[in-house]
Image (cartoon, grey):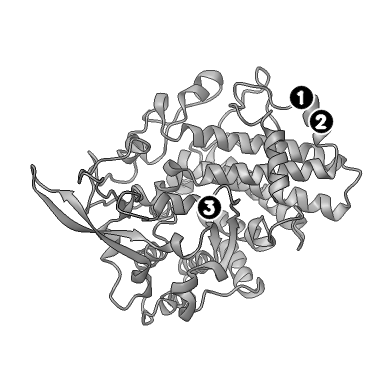
Amino acid sequence: MKKIFFLAIVLFSAVSCRDFLEHEPVEAISITTQLATKKGVLEALNGAYNQLRDNHFTEAAYTYGDLQSGNLKYPPNTSGTISVPVRVDNAYQFDDQPSASKLKDYYTNSYQVINNLNLILQYVDKLTDATSQEINEIKAEALALRAFVHFQLLKYYGQNYTYTPDASHLGIVYNIAPLKVGVDFPSRRTTAEAFDLLEKDITEALSLVQTQHAIPAGESINFMNPAAVKTLAAEIALWKNDWSKAYQYAGEIITESGLSLTPKNEFLSKWALSEMILYFANTTENQSHTANLYNFKTSTNRSSYVASEDIYNLYTSDDLRKQLFETQNLKTSVTGSSQSNLPYYFTKKYKVQNYSPVYRLSLVYFIRAEASLHQGNALQALEDVNAIRNRAGLPSLTQISMDVLLEEKRKEFVFENQYFFDLMRNHKNIIRNNGCIANNCSPSYPNNRFVLPIPQESVMINSNMKQNPGY
């Protein structure tokens, strides 16, 4: 794996280190030569995985779903002062600036990943040293990754699917071919059009995916394996309010993937490892992004984020998940020069296992539960939610509603970048109480600022690019 990773970095240093909107990435002879062989294409695919991992788990992007929704607050620094990290300050205020967006790199790097995947898809069918099965698997993984990255961009930069009755509001640029600067000036598609393309990519990926992953290293769980592709399909369907497809895909994963929820007696020692569907592998040189982001190591080496009491107080004393918090009493400036030692709740999820999770089976249970509830099948929704509760040592619920389901999902996925996006899909207001130091702690839905601004450089370079309303 280490050798492939190194070669992939060499390959993509020519096409990925700069903004694709500023530099043409597609016609270099070295790329044509590199992608003419199976070995070269696999090196490129491996490079895309590593590039995606490094981008997906950046601080501003991966804390977003918890920070904006009130799951996170800030602990004091070593002097006792609490402040907003500059890396997320404007986004936290729901006031990210197009000219200085804290997620600018996330946006541009996402399109770099997409462009590199499009290069792979452009060349893979021309391979003469790969079998048809190998070509199909490479295409399946590249298509699934392309859908995944576009889908994440939609979450951050486009309002939810039902923001307008016909999803005619602005979505994102959806690129299905490499771009050439000075030639290609793509426009943002409507959200409906973007979801059509998402479904097209993921449906084709499902039809091509093989049981053996393309890159001859690592484990299937590190790549877009069949269960991961289907989980993405289920999540896309859920976001589109296509309840029948979401239910179908989720049910097939639960009953046919061979995966099962982490058992109750292993939950604290293994957390989610045994139920993991997809996680991006880390090299020995590059440890878990999530561990670096959230772990408490020492009093002088601590993460910048802890759980707010808004979420922490939802756990009852008999909930096993409460034991996945690490309480640290830290010196805190209260009023004036007064200081007290106050409790702060760090997560232990990323101390249990050192990896960067993308999909785990618990999410699929919640997808099926939500789809079931919308289809009037409350019994199935209860069964799926109770499977998660029972694993946490809690008794079964006897009634279920969407608000109850969202709260149960909130407790299961804190520190996993979920809750804000669930609130937006369901047209909910934001409520940030404990520890909120923003100018606006509880903005109401609908709101222009519930999506991020397109970075100003992209608007200036591309005459067809439209900025999000309100920016």
Decide: marks 1, 2 in contact (CB < 8 A)?
yes
In the image, taking residue 389 as reference, residue 316 lies left or right, namely left
| Corner quadrant of residue 319 | bottom left
Q: Which residue is mark 2?
A: 32
Q: Is residue 386 above or below residue 408?
A: below
Q: Secondary structure at mark 3?
A: loop
Mark 1 or 3, nearer chain start: 1
Q: Is residue 36 above or below residue 279?
A: above
Q: Which residue is mark 3?
A: 240
Asked if residue 308 can be seen in this view, the reply is yes
* Residue at position x 43%, y 63% in the image: 349
Q: Quadrant of the C terminus?
A: top left
Q: Callout 1, which amino acid?
A: Ala
Q: Position of residue 325 (x, y in %)?
A: 34, 65
* Mark toward the start of the polypeptide (3 vs 2): 2
Q: Which residue is mark 1?
A: 28
* Residue 397 picture quarter: bottom left
- The disc at residue 158 is none
Which residue is situated farthest in the right direction here?
128
Which of 362 and 319 lies nearest the eye of the viewer?
319
Q: Residue 232 location, x and y as percent? A: 59, 56
